[in-house]
Amino acid sequence: MINTQNPDFSNSPVSPFRPKFRYFPRDLYIEPVISIVTPFYDTKEVFHETARSVLNQSFQEWEWIIVNDGSTSSKALAVLDKYRDGDPRIRVIDIEENQGLSTARNTGVKKATSEYILFLDSDDLLEPTATEKWLWFLYTHPEFSFVKGYSVGFGINPYLWSRGFHDGNAFLKENLVEATSLLRKTIFSTVGGFDESNHGGLEDWDFWLKCASHGYWGDTIPEYHSWYRRRSNQEVRWSNWSKKNFRKHFLKTARLKYPNLWKGDFPDIKKHWHQPYDQVQFSLSFKNLLASPKQRILMILPWLNMGGADKYNLDLIQQLKKRDWEITIIATDNGEHTWENDFFQLTPDIFILSRFLNLTDYPRFIEYLIKSRNPDIVFVSNSEIGYMLLPYLRASCPKQTFVDYCHMEEENWKNGGYARKSIVYQEQLNLTIVASEHLKKWILKNGSKEKYIEVSYINVDTDLLVPNPDMREWVCEEYNLEESTNIILFAGRLTEQKQPLVLLYALTHLIKKADNFVALVAGNGPMKNNMKHFIRKHKALKHKVKILGELPHAEVVELMQAADIFFLPSKQEGISLAIYEAMACGVVVVGADVGGQKELLTSNCGKLIPKSTEMLESREYAEIIHELLIKKDERRKYAKRARERVEREFNINDMGNRMVTLFEYAKNKNKDLPLLSVPIELGRVSAQEAIESVRLFYLAEQLWHGQYQQEAPFSIRLYFFIRKLFLPFYLRAGGDNNAFLYSVKRRVKKIF
């Protein structure tokens, strides 16, 4: 998928530089679920690119109807002949004389045998997972009639286009969507298809307005799924485009054809709002069984954001790809997924569920994906819903091997965090893998069984991360520092877990002892504003602390290579990936003796202090850092030994070998000692409870932050409007909803 931050319009879905996944059906002779309809008129070699993008779709239960609309070019006909006899799913329909796009599309739909129609022009492209996501969206959102994603314009004057069906009645002013989309065949039949009298273009705009006039409308998945080829003669090809006042003329005609739309009758279809105990659906009318010639892993993760666990996931994927594995990723949580481009560079098979599914459809989609990809390993890490759905997935996929990976325990969150989830669901897992011996001991102490648990350190790429003294000059120039200035680096999420305020407290103590330093803070998070407030309050820190925000990983590494001390006063950790990286870059680490940190950072290559109070910790950190700033020779020895230790014992390739060995061990254990089967009804009840639990969590989170979705029922939005209007009464009622409503009623009665 295209990188929206730095788009490369030459790196299309059929580029040889794209990551690959073998999408090929186990059986070519299947009943199609989707009919792809492509008008073809004198299209030459670029059609091969369109064909590759179709053949490489992650959803393979399709038929492709290519309508040859009276082509006369011998080169174009020679291109088309290559698709006439081969794949049994491809059919070429010939029209003797050119009739235009509308007739070609209508002809293709008449020949289609599926209930879903995908329109794709003969020179355009689809992202590999586009068809699959579009199908699942329509299948699970019966209120909508058609769907597509965002578009990439490529060729002449490339662009990114994020407008679409979600813009609703903006279609009364301009066409926001080209024909490439998926729709229900029944809708097409009801409205009568494309206007075959239109030979001048904009027939797709007319079709969308026709659908709207019948009360049908669609939605947009917020990902870039289709690539629209731009040509130098784009407007000249169509008279409706090339006419001086084409839009004015088109809209005048459209007003006469569909007058109700301009009278306020444009469909306003909302997504279904999750209700308490919405029924979780388990049935499915398609399977999409793919061949699996390579080893595969399906990873159930919470998100694709910046963080140590996410960087580990990237490293693991890279290691598996080096060993010729194919990777499927499911992201189960809402969020921005700021690192999704990094993951898309490694695999195309990525599904961020909240973008195209209702929460109630998560269980059957994950089950479907497991059966479709047939992975060797299903890997769960840090996804709460991933754990909670294990009983259902085990019931529906009883032969599958399930493995989880835990980074740390979190005593103050859900009685132990994901490590606690691992214990609770251990009977559904073939193997638990943890990031440290410390965590293994914690899990065993808290109720797990040793046969279920193995250690694999996360490790680091010591070929990529190396000391580089030359980087110091660049960093000093970039941040306007004297080269003699001591650089203290903090890199991590600005959350309570990382204790950034302890960092600042320590610096207030340090500044009384040493003045020649600056602290660079690389990261973002909810504690960022707290830190800024602290710095404003303690003015001596104003020129000593630079909060840089979230930086690309490569820039963080450069800061490590330039730093004198890496400082991470965490409240809790597994073993911080940032410490692995800092040690590889030859930096002295000062941090907290929590989790398994001392398994990596021994006393001869860095400094760890035990947990105590924030005030005591900050004073002790200041003493240690001050001593290291003074004793430069000792600091260099620590740094050298740190680099040697990581290079010798914690190399990234060792992690890859270890994980593959453990996956094989888990598969063999699953064969020799299979887990007890879970009754399917129990699995379904468990899934229903899991979805309701997650629904309540999301709702509570939205209410806590005051983020109320526009599609919420009117009664809910009205309630919060009234509460805001009568805020003094709500506060006087102590936040009690019943007391608040009673006080409002009394006030209203008094007024009237």
Image (cartoon, rainbow, N blue to C red):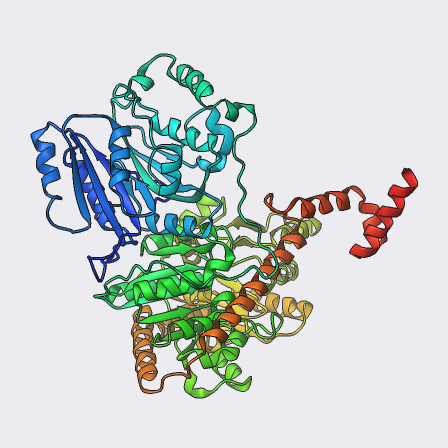
Q: Position of residue 368 (x, y in %)?
A: 37, 63
**Which residue is pictured at 33% across the width and 30% down the height?**
194
Residue 249 vertical position relative to residue 470 in the rendered view, above or below:
above
Instruction: Name the residue nearer the viewer: 586 or 442.
Output: 442
Q: Position of residue 302 (x, y in %)?
A: 47, 61
Instruction: Name the residue nearer the viewer: 247 or 382.
Output: 247
**Which residue is pictured at 49% across the width and 62% down the height?**
565
Q: Furthest residue to the top?
A: 244
Q: Furthest residue to the right?
A: 750
Q: Position of residue 672 (x, y in %)?
A: 31, 87
From this viewpoint, is residue 587 visible? Answer: no
**How many numbered marks have been drawn onto this rendered protein structure?**
0
Instruction: Name the residue nearer the viewer: 742 or 19.
Output: 742
Residue 350 in which image quadrant: bottom left
Relative placement, left or right, of 118 versus 735 is: left
Quadrant for the C terminus, please.
Answer: top right
Residue 93 in which image quadrant: top left
From this viewpoint, is residue 403 visible? Answer: yes
**Which residue is pictured at 18% across the width and 25% down the height?**
98
Relative placement, left or right, of 478 versus 40 is: right
**Which residue is pictured at 36% across the width and 37% down the height?**
189
Instruction: Name the residue nearer the viewer: 459 or 112.
Output: 112
Residue 614 vertical position relative to residue 700 in the rendered view, above or below:
below
Q: Position of residue 465 (x, y in %)?
A: 35, 61
